[in-house]
Image (tube, rainbow, N blue to C red):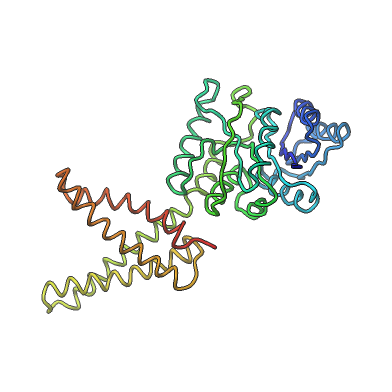
Amino acid sequence: MKTVIIIPSLDPDDKLIGYVGELIEAGQNNILLIDDGSSKERRKYFDEIRDRYGVKILTHHINMGKGRALKDAFNYCLTEIPECEGVITVDSDGQHSVKDVLRMAEDLEEHRDSLILGARNFRKSNVPFKSEYGNRITRNIVKLLYGGNITDTQTGLRALSYDILPSFLTLEGERFEYETGMLIEALRQHIPIREVEIETIYIEENKGSHFRPLQDSWKIYKLILGTFLKYSIVSLISAALDLGIFHLIVSLLSGAKLGEMVWIATVGARIVSSLFNYTANKNVVFGSGKGVATLVKYYILCIVQMCLSALLVWLLAGVIGLPKVLIKAVVDTVLFFLSFRIQKAWVFREK
């Protein structure tokens, strides 16, 4: 299987020349470098690589970010190198050994339908604390909101075939958040995600990285949490709407019997608030799902969630003996997260 080795780089040093030479000696002749707006002093290394090895180089006049560099490279491969069948993205700071790149190429031959990640072992003593801690938080949030069991969410060593490459051309993100977006998109489209354990290399505690801890972390978590935050806001508005309409109907039926008043107000408020919640989730939160099928699925989920909430509160109250309101708060919080996952994966899932 012919693959293109994609190496985005910003202000490299002479080690990049040696690394490209090692890849070529190992038989990886299809190499695409992206100069992501390097300074004039550092562009000489790209010139030397091009003159010595004949490597194709895409150049950004200014720094546009790793995400943009990868998307430009993916598009170039699909349109200009059709004789190849897959790509392997590699960082230029020396973290990925040639041996591991070759292992990724071998795994890609057997798993053309998968996004393959080169996963590092974060339990190693040479892993900087900020890298281990940041990866742990990110992978747990991704698992909670989107599923999957990804060990290394930050790895830049990835392999994917031309079969699935178009799925990642138009994703959001121009910098490091784009790589996180690739994982979310793969989970959303049910593209298998595989991991190949690789050597854990950190040179001078990763000082050569261009990752900006505050700005880039903000962009990553904004991307991860964006849909969930919209889902949460819509849910709060729906709850306020439910309460307001309940109060309005109770006021209008002030002369009715208490039981009738409560039931009519509860049902009427829930119909209106649930229709608002469904419409907002379909059009604003998930931005997908058409036809009557999604409405039917939505109300099936509502009924099941309501019954499950009542059943769990009843069972746990009898076993634990804690106040029912406290138990209901915990149960409904768990069901809230579960409902988000189900709505995303089933109710409003794109075909």
| Rendering coords of residue 92 (x, y %) | 70, 32
Q: Is residue 328 left or right of residue 121?
A: left
Question: Residue 72 vs residue 187: left or right?
Answer: right
Q: Is residue 279 left or right of residue 28?
A: left
Residue at the spot 70% in from the left edge and 50% down from the top edge: 162
Q: Is residue 323 left or right of residue 2?
A: left
Give the vertical position of 164 relative to 194 (above or below): below
In the rendered view, tell whether residue 222 sits above or below residue 260: above
Percent x, y of residue 320:
17, 43
> Which residue is located at x 68 percent, y 52 percent?
163
Count of numbered marks: 0
In the depicted view, which residue is nearer to us: 197 or 267? 197
Front residue of 242/343: it is: 343
User: Is 344 drawn above or below residue 138 in the view shown?
Assistant: below
The quarter in which the C terminus is drawn is bottom right
Q: Quadrant of residue 58?
A: top right
Q: Residue furthest right?
A: 51
Outermost residue toward the top?
Answer: 125
Residue at image coords 71%, 48%: 74
Q: Residue at x 67, y 34 (%)?
A: 91
Q: Position of residue 10 (x, y in %)?
A: 71, 36
Classify residue 212 by image quadrant.
top right
Indicate the position of residue 115 as horizontal and vertical percent values.
61, 44
Q: Where is the N terminus found, in terms of image quarters?
A: top right
